[in-house]
Image (tube, helix red, strand yellow):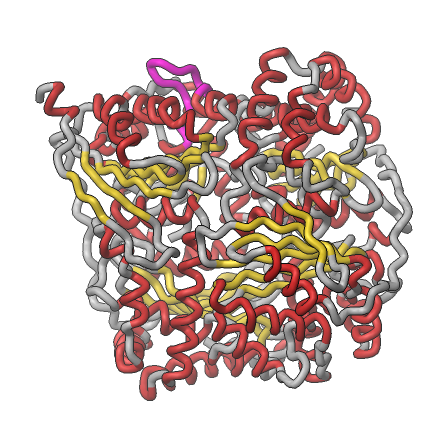
């Protein structure tokens, strides 16, 4: 039976929405976890958390580069490379490879985002060696058989047709297009019907050789494995990849403000809006204050200002949330909500009013204290499964942090003052630079 | 009823999980007022998951007021005799915790995740709103707009959800599983404060609830806390759950077609009713789960090989939903590639189903499916929320902790004969509902003769 909930979990909605665009900032690390930096014999670095209470091992990794490296006209290439890695490798045909994955009961996933190719493996401890061997094959010796390429292409084309009708996807895609015109970031990461049709086998093999290299690799291993075995596994899995990747990372860019909301007209009963503006990089000294501010306005909890004003007081939307996104080229504060077509204008009015008021007056002392208590206290909650620990740590690392971030993070939040948050609100919440994209038939 | 009696723990069952490290330590006991308590120990991090499961859901919505169980779940975040509206969640947030709630046809559940030192505070809050809810007319009206908005975004905004909703209403002739748990829009729009209060007074009581505490706690720590909080609430001795009508024997295959311009692709969906883990004889649901996995669980499955590998579909899979009190469900889904007629992929689905009903499955397929399910069980056991859900929901359905813990053994003991038998029994054509989602009435891409039904 389908389950329906009082509200979307604090992160679920935006995570779904933004999955393709960025690694979510891991905002709730835990000091109890011992994160160790290890280096394999071949020099591959990884973060390791030993956790022996459940007999499973989770690995998460990222190769920096991703869809931002797709040549113009061949958008969707990195996504298709990632798909093809599990379609047969080495001596194993597609069928034989998948039969082994299935028999091991392992979870193996590879996908491309704008900034990286991401991968994950979860398997029972007792099946770790054969599972790791399959991952090695997938990364180092994918077959790129013509038959599988054609099948994956037709699957991608169907996926694109479906995604073109998902309001959230369309709204956020359009948001990036408006914010970064002419930039690789403004192009659709999964490609278009035309660009996917153009991708040839040599494009795939060429991009595979360029993107998958040890020099751009970050790996996190969590679970029932010791340091020596983890270091050996790093060399087994990744050791045969070339050292140097051939990627040209994008230059930093600022979103270009749009004067009025951009509407993608579709005949829908509701309108979905994506909204956002430039924010602060995760290494900015004021970033902890921005985290506090973001929680106050857009956590999605009932006491968040936007939820209070849009949902609780007016019943305009089921969920309204904002998140802090770190892309390689920029840092953003991005949010979304869905409301009736005829109430979109008033909901946007409430949104702007909240941003203006918060920029002018800042939050009050009790909102500020509650947010800090939440951010420091909720600390442990996202670190309760090996897979989630691995994903969160990888996100923290990709954002440029060190393993000891876990120890420092709460101190940083605790050091934030109300004056800091007010200053950041004035600087960041500039409604003049707000970009809004809407899918539906909104009355504005 | 004396206070002492209320506070007295009646039944105390200690249950030890089997030796495998993957299975957690689970203890159960019952408070004097009839509230069942489950404690699941997980000492990895100093966090607890606290859940209350009410044995009431959308299947209990009185006729004409569909959606009331879910609406009440939303209203439970408003004021009580002690708390101002919104204060519940605000307090959880201040404690650095998370909270949410979920309504299904069978249960309404509320949960919080907090650092272990806040467990008592959370139990006090949840025990308070079990009996002290106070609803203000204005807040009820605004919240009704919120559930209507929720329906618009999650159901009406998604053609596949609409198709599924239509199919379920046809799959069940007599049982309330045929009504959507969020409610029909025209009935939701008329739900009142009084509807919510009547439902609340009738069903929200300690003797209709299961408490689950999972995490860094022991039963010895939880017992006195439970007695001091929930133990003070009076039971509803007159509580009678309405009888849920049984389904008649299905005798006719049914078809549903949804035409929706917002659909990005054509979809074929097929449902068959079946037993669930709670309603079927031991092992039956386990056989169905293995069957679904073999037919359509992953890229080695029969449907994937026949449809996706052969470049007829982009997606082809099967799924068994067995976490229900009454009927479970086998589901099959196929998204054909552009240019491939729906009739063609449906004929292949029928052929695959016929084959498994007549010839069964191979030992190799069964072994692979068992191995995969074993791994999924361990992945789930790594997740405190999922563990708490497994026990809270199962016990709310009337299963014992032992039954729930022995599921892996029941899966491993299934034979190829078992799989063949359940396939033959439950995948009979006349039991099914077939649904198609079409972006437009005629299938332009599949040729003019494509739609003939």
Q: Nearer the viewer, residue B100 or A377?
A: A377
Q: Nearer the viewer, residue A289 or B77?
A: A289
Q: Quadrant of the N terminus of chain B?
A: top left
Magenta stretch: give its range. Answer: B74-87
Q: Is residue A272 visible?
A: yes
**Residue B48 horizontal/vertical position (percent):** 41, 35
Query: Is residue A128 left or right of B223 when viewed as pictured?
Result: right
Q: Is residue B69 above or below residue A241?
A: above
In magenta segment, residue A144 = no
**Residue A203 horizontal/vertical position (percent):** 83, 74
Q: Which residue appears at 31% of the width and 81% of the height?
A: B416
Q: Kindly indicate the quadrant of the structure image that contains residue B111.
A: top left
Q: Is residue A382 above or below residue A68?
A: above
**Residue B34 horizontal/vertical position (percent):** 17, 34
Q: Quadrant of the C terminus of chain B?
A: bottom left
Q: Which residue appears at 42% of the width and 71% of the height?
A: B371
Query: Is residue A355 left or right of B53 when viewed as pictured?
Result: right
Q: Residue furthest bottom?
A: B359
Q: Which residue appears at 65% of the width and 21% of the height?
A: A414
Q: Kindly indicate the quadrant of the structure image that contains residue B326.
A: bottom left
- Main secondary structure found in the magenta portion: loop
Query: Is residue B73 left or right of A319 when viewed as pictured?
Result: left
**Residue B363 horizontal/vertical position (percent):** 37, 84
Q: Kindly indicate the quadrant of the structure image that contains residue B68.
A: top left
Q: Is residue A362 above or below residue A147?
A: above
Query: Is residue B44 left or right of A98 when viewed as pictured?
Result: left
Q: Is residue A441 visible?
A: no
């Amino acid at each position: 039976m389908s389950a329906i909930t009082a509200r979307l979990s604090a992160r679920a909605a935006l995570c779904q929405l933004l999955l393709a665009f960025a690694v979510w900032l891991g905002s709730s690390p835990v000091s109890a976890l011992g994160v160790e930096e290890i280096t394999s014999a071949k020099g591959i670095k990884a973060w390791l958390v030993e956790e022996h209470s459940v007999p499973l091992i989770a690995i998460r990794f990222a190769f920096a580069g991703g869809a931002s490296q797709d040549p113009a006209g061949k958008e969707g290439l990195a996504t298709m490379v990632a798909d093809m890695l599990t379609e047969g490798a080495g001596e194993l045909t597609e069928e034989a490879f998948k039969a082994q994955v299935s028999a091991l009961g392992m979870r193996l996933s590879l996908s491309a985002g704008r900034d990286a190719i991401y991968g994950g493996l979860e398997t029972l401890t007792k099946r770790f060696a054969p599972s790791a061997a399959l991952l090695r094959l997938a990364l180092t010796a994918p077959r790129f058989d013509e038959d599988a390429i054609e099948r994956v292409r037709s699957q991608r084309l169907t996926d694109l047709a479906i995604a073109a009708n998902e309001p959230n996807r369309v709204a956020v895609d359009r948001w990036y297009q408006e914010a970064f015109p002419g930039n690789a970031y403004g192009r659709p990461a999964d490609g278009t019907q035309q660009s996917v049709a153009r991708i040839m086998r040599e494009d795939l093999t060429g991009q595979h050789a360029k993107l998958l290299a040890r020099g751009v690799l970050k790996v996190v291993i969590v679970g029932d494995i010791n340091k020596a075995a983890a270091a050996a596994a790093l060399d087994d899995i990744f050791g045969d990849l070339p050292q140097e990747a051939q990627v040209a990372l994008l230059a930093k860019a600022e979103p270009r403000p749009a004067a009025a909301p951009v509407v993608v007209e579709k005949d829908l009963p509701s309108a979905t809006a994506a909204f956002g503006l430039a924010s602060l990089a995760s290494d900015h000294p004021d970033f902890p204050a921005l985290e506090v501010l973001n929680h106050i306005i857009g956590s999605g909890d009932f006491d968040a200002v936007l939820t209070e004003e849009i949902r609780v007081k007016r019943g305009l939307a089921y969920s309204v949330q904002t998140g802090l996104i770190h892309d390689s080229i920029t840092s953003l504060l991005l949010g979304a909500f869905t409301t009736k077509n005829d109430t979109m204008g008033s909901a946007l009015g409430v949104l702007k009013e909240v941003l203006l008021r918060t920029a002018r007056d800042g939050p009050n002392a009790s909102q500020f204290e509650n947010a800090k208590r939440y951010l420091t206290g909720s600390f442990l909650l996202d670190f309760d499964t090996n897979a989630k620990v691995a994903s969160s740590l990888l996100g923290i690392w990709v954002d440029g942090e060190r393993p000891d971030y876990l120890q420092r993070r709460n101190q940083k939040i605790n050091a934030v003052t109300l004056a800091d948050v007010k200053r950041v609100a004035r600087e960041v919440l500039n409604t003049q630079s707000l970009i809004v994209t809407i899918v539906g038939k909104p009355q504005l | 009823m004396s206070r002492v009696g209320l506070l007295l723990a009646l039944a105390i069952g200690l249950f030890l999980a089997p030796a495998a490290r993957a299975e957690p330590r689970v203890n159960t006991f019952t408070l004097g007022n009839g509230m069942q308590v489950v404690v699941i120990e997980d000492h990895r991090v100093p966090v607890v998951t606290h859940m209350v499961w009410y044995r009431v859901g959308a299947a209990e919505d009185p006729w004409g007021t569909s959606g009331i169980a879910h609406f009440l779940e939303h209203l439970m975040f408003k004021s009580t005799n002690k708390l101002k509206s919104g204060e519940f969640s605000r307090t959880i947030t201040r404690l650095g915790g998370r909270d949410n709630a979920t309504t299904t046809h069978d249960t309404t559940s509320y949960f919080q995740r907090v650092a272990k030192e806040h467990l008592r505070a959370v139990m006090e809050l949840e025990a308070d709103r079990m009996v002290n809810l106070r609803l203000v007319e204005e807040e009820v009206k605004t919240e009704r707009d919120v559930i209507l908005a929720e329906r618009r975004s999650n159901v009406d905004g998604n053609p596949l959800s609409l198709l599924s909703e239509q199919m379920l209403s046809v799959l069940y002739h007599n049982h309330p599983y045929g009504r959507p748990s969020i409610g029909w829009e025209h009935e939701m729009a008329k739900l009142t404060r009084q509807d919510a209060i009547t439902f609340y007074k009738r069903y929200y009581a300690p003797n209709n609830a299961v408490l689950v505490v999972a995490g860094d706690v022991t039963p010895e720590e939880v017992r006195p806390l439970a007695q001091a909080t929930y133990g003070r609430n009076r039971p509803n001795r007159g509580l009678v759950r309405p009888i849920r009508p049984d389904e008649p024997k299905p005798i006719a295959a049914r078809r549903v077609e949804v035409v929706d311009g917002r659909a990005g692709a054509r979809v074929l969906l097929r449902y068959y009713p079946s037993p669930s883990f709670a309603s079927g004889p031991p092992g039956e649901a386990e056989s169905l789960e293995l069957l679904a996995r073999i037919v359509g669980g992953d890229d080695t499955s029969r449907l994937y090989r026949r449809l996706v590998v052969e470049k007829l579909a982009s997606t082809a899979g099967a799924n068994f939903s067995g976490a229900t009190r009454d009927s479970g469900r086998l589901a099959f889904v196929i998204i054909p590639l552009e240019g491939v007629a729906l009739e063609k992929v449906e004929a292949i689905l029928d052929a695959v189903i016929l084959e498994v009903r007549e010839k069964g499955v191979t030992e190799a397929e069964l072994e692979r499916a068992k191995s995969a399910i074993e791994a999924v069980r361990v992945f789930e056991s790594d997740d405190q929320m999922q563990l708490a859900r497994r026990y809270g929901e199962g016990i709310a359905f009337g299963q014992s902790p032992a039954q729930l813990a022995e599921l892996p053994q029941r899966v491993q003991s299934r034979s190829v004969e078992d799989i063949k038998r359940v396939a033959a029994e439950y995948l009979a054509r006349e039991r099914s509902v077939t649904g198609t989602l079409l972006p437009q009435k005629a299938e332009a891409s599949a040729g003019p003769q494509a739609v003939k039904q």
